[in-house]
């Protein structure tokens, strides 16, 4: 009986690993096409400043309120459609460590506050970044993203390691992936938002306006993460505690494989760009 259960469990693990690998490869190969899609009535976040300059505006006083709403939706779309550095890791944490809903959403908000703080530290004209060139600021943004990618890699490795550690029972303590998740969320600097803030630095007359436009975008990002958290909570509730406990290895291996495929692809692309 024990051997039958072990073989059944092994079969499910192979299926979870194969499914995660397949989904990761699909995202890697088709994500550029998916990412290029954008609702026609939404502005590209990075081009909003150049749109205002083209309209002859040096102030946002006359900017219609609808534009702020569109930027909020644009921030939501930017974060919600990204599978790699928010959605799948958030769902993985909910299923792997099973935090309470209050703790889960509390840490989502904390990571968002940290992310906003890092944007301010790097791109506001204060302190050591005051007179830095665009190239230097882009390097800072890249360095923050490298931290995000490394934290995501650690998260994926922990998930796979736990899933393949046969000595752990359903009741055994598992690796807490909250810390690498918070690093991945906090240090991520999407290029669209980076270019928005670089535009604010370039055009001094609308510098304050740049940060006023940054606010609705980041609120959209927060709403996207909270929506993802809500989906994760609903998924856990739908599965139920019994199935979560019985299938946690499969969930961990599936999510871990998806994350590892995507972050490995990212590191390969970074390495190839550095070798050019």
Image (spheres, rainbow, N blue to C red):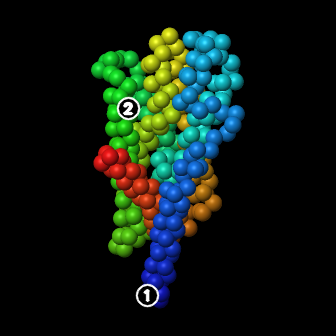
> Where is residue 94 shown, x and y percent of the image?
50, 54
Q: Along the line of sight, which residue is nearer the eye, 161 or 66? A: 66
In the displayed structure, 79 sits above or below 7; it is above
Q: Residue 3 shows which numbered tag?
A: 1
In the displayed structure, 216 sits above or below 238; it is above
In the displayed structure, 48 sits above or below 30; it is above
Regarding mark 2 in the picture, which secondary structure is present there?
helix
Residue 22 can be seen in this image: yes
Tell us which disc is closer to us: 1 or 2: 2
| Residue at the spot 37% in from the left edge and 38% down from the top edge | 142
Q: Along the line of sight, which residue is nearer the eye, 188 or 104? A: 188
Marks 1 and 2: CB-CB under 8 Å? no
In the displayed structure, 145 sits above or below 133; it is below
> Where is residue 30 shown, x and y percent of the image?
55, 55
Q: Residue 138 shows which numbered tag?
A: 2
Mark 1 to mark 2 CA distance (whole Å) = 55 Å
């Amino acid at each position: 009986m024990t051997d039958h259960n072990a073989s059944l469990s092994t079969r499910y693990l192979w299926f979870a690993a194969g499914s995660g690998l397949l989904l990761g490869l699909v995202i890697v190969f088709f994500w550029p096409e998916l990412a290029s899609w954008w609702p026609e009535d939404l502005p590209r976040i990075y081009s909003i400043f150049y749109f205002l300059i083209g309209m002859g505006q040096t102030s946002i006083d006359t900017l219609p309120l609808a534009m702020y709403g569109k930027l909020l939706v644009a921030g939501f779309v930017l974060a919600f459609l990204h599978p790699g550095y928010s959605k799948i890791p958030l769902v993985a944490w909910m299923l792997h460590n099973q935090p309470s809903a209050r703790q889960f959403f509390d840490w989502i908000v904390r990571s968002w506050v940290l992310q906003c703080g890092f944007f301010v530290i790097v791109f506001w004209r204060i302190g050591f970044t005051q007179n830095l060139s665009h190239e230097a600021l882009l390097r800072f943004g890249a360095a923050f993203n490298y931290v995000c990618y490394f934290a995501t890699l650690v998260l994926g490795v922990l998930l796979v390691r736990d899933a393949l550690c046969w000595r752990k029972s359903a009741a055994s303590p598992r690796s807490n992936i909250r810390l690498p998740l918070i690093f991945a969320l906090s240090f991520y600097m999407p290029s669209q938002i980076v270019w928005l803030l670089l535009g604010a630095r370039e055009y001094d007359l609308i510098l304050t306006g740049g940060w006023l436009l940054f606010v609705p975008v980041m609120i959209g990002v927060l709403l996207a993460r909270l929506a993802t958290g809500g989906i994760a909570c609903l998924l856990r509730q739908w599965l139920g505690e019994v199935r979560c406990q019985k299938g946690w290895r499969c969930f961990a291996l599936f999510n871990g494989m998806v994350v590892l495929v995507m972050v490995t692809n990212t590191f390969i692309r970074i390495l190839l760009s550095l070798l050019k």
